[in-house]
Structure formats: C-alpha cells, structure tokens
Amino acid sequence: MRDPQMTCEIGTRELIELDGLGVRLRGTYHRAPQRAAMQDRVGVLFVNSLSLPRAASGDSAVHWADAIAAFGYPSFRVDLPGLGDSEGHATTDLLDFINAGGFTSVAAAVVKQLVQRFSLSGVILFGHCAGSVSALYAGAASPECRGLILLDPYFHLPQAKRPKLREELSDWARRSKLGRLLSNAYDHVRSLALLARGNAPPPNANAQLLARWKQVASAGMPALLLKAPGIKAQGAKPRVGEFDYMDYIVELAGKKSRVAAEFVEGADHSFANRKGRDEVERHIEQWLAANFPLPRFDVSAGDAQAPRSNDVKLDANKQMAAPVARYCALEGR
Amino acid sequence: MHIENQPDGQLASESNERAGYFQVSGAHLYTVLHEVKNPVARVLLVGPFASERHNSYLPWVRWARHLAAGNIEVLRYDYRGIGESTGDFEKMTFADWAEDVRLLAACLQQRAPHAPLLLHGLGLGAILAGRAFDAGTGDGLLLWSPPANANQALRATLLRWVGLEQIFKFGDDRKSASDYIRELEQGSALDVDGYRWSPELWRDSFQFAMPAALSSEAEAARAYERPVKMMKLTRDAAPLAKGGLVGYDDLKDFTWLFEPNREWIASTASQLSKKAAYA
C-alpha cells in the first residue's frame, strides 16, 4: 500500500534513478515546458562539487536547475557514486580522485543514459569548483556532451590540507596591518618569480585537465566560464603573483573556440549568495539562448505540458537503454 | 568507481532506500526511507539545519544505512525550505519545522508491522526531536549535541560561516560575528551560506528551547518513563560536530560513533517490545 501523501514527482520535479556503471545513482529531474521538439532539446546535467550533495551550497543547484528548466532546457541533478543519496563509497582522497578524472567514466555513462532515456540531442555539463573538474573530464570523454558551464574552475592541483602554521600565518596576515604589508610584499616576490618563468603555468598545473580543456574548447564546444572574486583579486584578474589561468585557458582554446568568460561581481566562491545566484542565472539564460536557441518556443506552453520521464519514453517512440526507475518513500506500506 | 564495503557498513541496505516527497502545508518534504522487513525499531532522523545539512550529509546518510543494516528502519528528510524539500526558507518558522517532525513521526508510526519508534536529533534537530518527544511522540529519544535553545545552534552556524567569509577578506573588510548579529538584531536579513536568515528567525530562536526535562539524562529519567540518551559530540565527530575539513572528514570511518549508538537503539527497542508484550 502506498502512502497517499507520498509521491515521486511534484510540480516540475521528479526523482529518478540511474545506472552508474553498476552503482545505483539517485537524482532529480527538473522538467522543462515543451518549448521545442523533443529531439532538438539539450539537457543540463549538474554534477557534485567535491562532497556536497546534489542541492549544492545554499541549495543553489536546485535554484539554477529550476530556472534552467523554466527557460526550456530539462535539467538533471545527479549524485555521483558515494555522494549524496547515491550508492557506492567515495574515497577519503576525494579531491585527488576528482583532479585525476576519477568520475569521468561514470559521469559520461550518466550523460549517455540521459540522452537515451529523455531523447535529448545532447547534454551540457554543469560543475562548480571540483565539480567543474569532473564536468570537464566527462565532457571530453562524452560524445553526447554539447557544452560546458563551469563555475570557478581550477586548473591546478591544490593542496587539500595546508600545514597548520601556514593557515595561522595567512589568518594573521588577513587580520593585521603589518601582516597585510608582508603579504603584499610576498605577492610581489611571487610576481617576479612568475615573470622569470615567462608567465608559464606553474609546476602544479593539472596538465591532464588542461589537455582535456584544449581538446574540447579548440573543437568549438560552447563553454561558459563564470568566475567569482578571489582572495586579494583585482576584479577578474587574479591576486598579484598568481598565474592567470582564465587568460591562459581562453588563449589555449584558440580562435575557433566558443568560450564565454564572465566575472560575477558580488558573488562568493559558492555563488550561493543572493547576488551570485541571480547573476549566474542571468548569465546562463543569455548563454543558453545564444548557443542553444529553442526555435519552436511555444509561449503558451506551461508546466502541464512538461514531459515526465514516462511520457518521454512514449513520445520518443524508441527503446530506452534502461527502464525508468521510480521509487517512492513509504511505498509498499 | 567500484563499490566497496565501508567499515561502518553503509552498503548493506542501500537497495531498499526509497526517496519521495511528503506533502505538508504549502510545501513538500524530501524524504528517504531506509526500508527494512520486520524491523526491531523505527527511527526518525531529525538532521542538521540549513548549511550544516550539506556539510554533514555523507555521514548522516551513512548513519541511516548503518542503522538499516542492523534491522532498524529509518526515515530521514530535509526540513521545509531546505535541500531537496520545497518552500521558501526565509518564510519558514520553527513551528513549521516542528510540524514536519510531528507529521513524519505519525506517518512512520503507522507503518506495519509495529515496532518501537525512536526519535534521533542532531544540533537544532535535537531540539525539534526533543520537543516532539516532550509532547508525547516516540517511544525513545537519542540526542546528539543538543543545544539549550535554537539560538545556540544558529550562533554556531554563523560562527562557522563568518570564519569562512574572513578567509576572503582583509583588514577593515572583515566583519566579526558580532557585526553580523547586530545587523540581524537591527532588523536586517542575513545571507548565511546561501540561506537568508530573517530577523524574525533570529529573534524566535531564543525562545525555541529544549524542554527543561531534557536538560540532562538524569532529568529526563525523572520526567519521562521512556528511555532517553544524550551525548555531546566532540571534534572527532566532525562534520557532525563543528570543525573538520569538507571533503575529508565527511568520508572518514564513523564506526566508533555509530556502533554503540545503534546498539543502544536496538537494546532499547528490545526492552520496549518486551514491556509492550507483558502489558
């Protein structure tokens, strides 16, 4: 007996399960009003940022997925193996795992399933911070990937646990006037070192990831890069003495690339604050409209016409790779 | 990534997890039932609040799986306006979140076959679980790091957020926790980790307190004829307690915490079942 108060779908949201190479993955599908022929639609897939669940900081991913679906693009937030509500076990060196492309195969498998199950023409991968690393690796490995939305992507191999003394020094530098002076002096020494290096990427650059970036960006895959103000940064420019990865990757993408890099003033690194969240939404809407227009937009189409996962199966009139799994809490009481 | 079995036994019951939306007034709660056949007990998990949910999500899910692996059925959920649940966070009140606990506990209690129902709360969730228990809901209560009132929980969350904010600020740009608290007390809303805290939420948090009878286990033993266990989590339990590093501490082994607590729930449920049978 099923609890009448319990359901797998509400409004334009629906809970879904996917096969993550033998691991059961759980996620949320945000249905879009049927603005274009089903086969013309691209979907947007959100992947986890480090160990955060699929809602992301401040539930920002929920907000953006709702917004993107309302623009006409079905959106999917899926927990990768070992994260959120999905099965599997994430390793304790998760950051290293992600930076080495550990989620590439499973994320690419998810893209493939979404395309088949929902009859999409392709998928745009959306990632924030460590999620942008997973999105980029998966985008390069997935023939169905049509674009990338990367929030504060990083292209170096960060040190996950900084020594305590270093942390304390940094904190002191931020608090005191003398500390700030010394910090500024240190930045200038680093800028000299950067110049001496001929403005080449630092030794801890993630060469594997940069190669993937070059592969997809130079091939003309549309990419939207959004950057929040950094520590001691001057607008979109990084802190004095820091290598300018944004400039570098835009240049690396080449002249034929379709890369849009935007600075999001007022956002924090999570982009979850009100200002950051709204600006991200605005940039995404413009970018989607410019790169993935929905020509047969039916203004009168409302939520009632938004295809459900089961409707998609019927409308698409083609074999699904995997059955649509719908499980409700308290079902079978 | 291949599936490995985790030391704290998370995988045993994953295939019986059912996610769904539970309708409440003006919103839907996201719930996950860790279903068990013939459970020895049922537990409603009342989890961490707002941004604390995200930081401690992985160990919280694993705790639910650990319980289910021990034949204890679990229902976990997201508060109204938070996570996968719907509703506008800014408009939510402690009364709304208290109602969530009451409705879900009632729903869980109706499931067959009958088994003792325990409430388990962490942080602000401990107050919600404690108040529901005080009002007669549940056969037993487990509290981790219960604050005296909701303001203590909010303050702890605020301090953590201010600490992160200060990493990005220098000198005079750095605001202290007192500065932010002053803003709230002067009637301005505050964006904390993506959640807009209203001045009303802050004001009401002082009044939303743990029942006096739950100030200690000894007091609870005097006040209730139902079992109560309370424990303050130390830094070792981060991110379920304050501290720790996101992406590392949430993936560590929590067997040392989970196992004795699961044993307490199982033995408590066994005693309750025997008592009910004699009655």
Image (cartoon, rainbow, N blue to C red):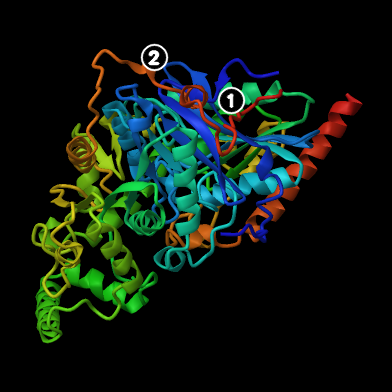
Q: Amino acid at mark 2?
A: Ala
Residue ranking furthest to the front: A318
Give the residue displayed 34% in from the left and 21% down from the top. Answer: A34
Chain ID at mark 1: B
Q: Amino acid at mark 1?
A: Leu
Position in image of residue A17 (x %, y %): 55, 38
Give the residue displayed 15% in from the left and 68% down from the top. Answer: A244
**What is the secondary structure assignment of the residue under circle 2?**
helix
**What is the secondary structure assignment of the residue under circle 1?**
helix
Q: Nearer the viewer, residue A308 or B137?
A: A308
Q: Which mark is residue A304?
A: 2
Q: Which mark is residue B253?
A: none
A151 over A284 or under it: above or below: below
Chain ID at mark 2: A
Quarter of the rendering occupied by the N terminus of chain A: top right
Q: Which mark is residue B104?
A: 1
Quarter of the rendering occupied by the C terminus of chain A: top right
3D distance between C-alphas at marks 2 and 1:
29 Å
In the displayed structure image, the side of residue A118 where residue B126 appears, left or right:
right
Q: Name which quarter of the figure residue B155 lies in.
A: top left
Give the residue displayed 30% in from the left and 15% down from the top. Answer: A301
Q: Nearer the viewer, residue B104 or A13?
A: A13
A301 over B32 or under it: above or below: above
Position in image of residue A105 (x %, y %): 49, 57
Position in image of residue A139 (x %, y %): 36, 54
Q: Judge depth for marks 2 and 1 and give the one in front.
A: 2
Residue B211 visible in the picture:
no
Count neighbours of disc 1 (C-alpha within 10 A) and say few if under 14, some if 14 to 19, many if 20 or more: some
Q: Nearer the viewer, residue A125 or B135?
A: A125
Count neighbours of disc 2 (C-alpha within 10 A) and say few if under 14, some if 14 to 19, many if 20 or more: few
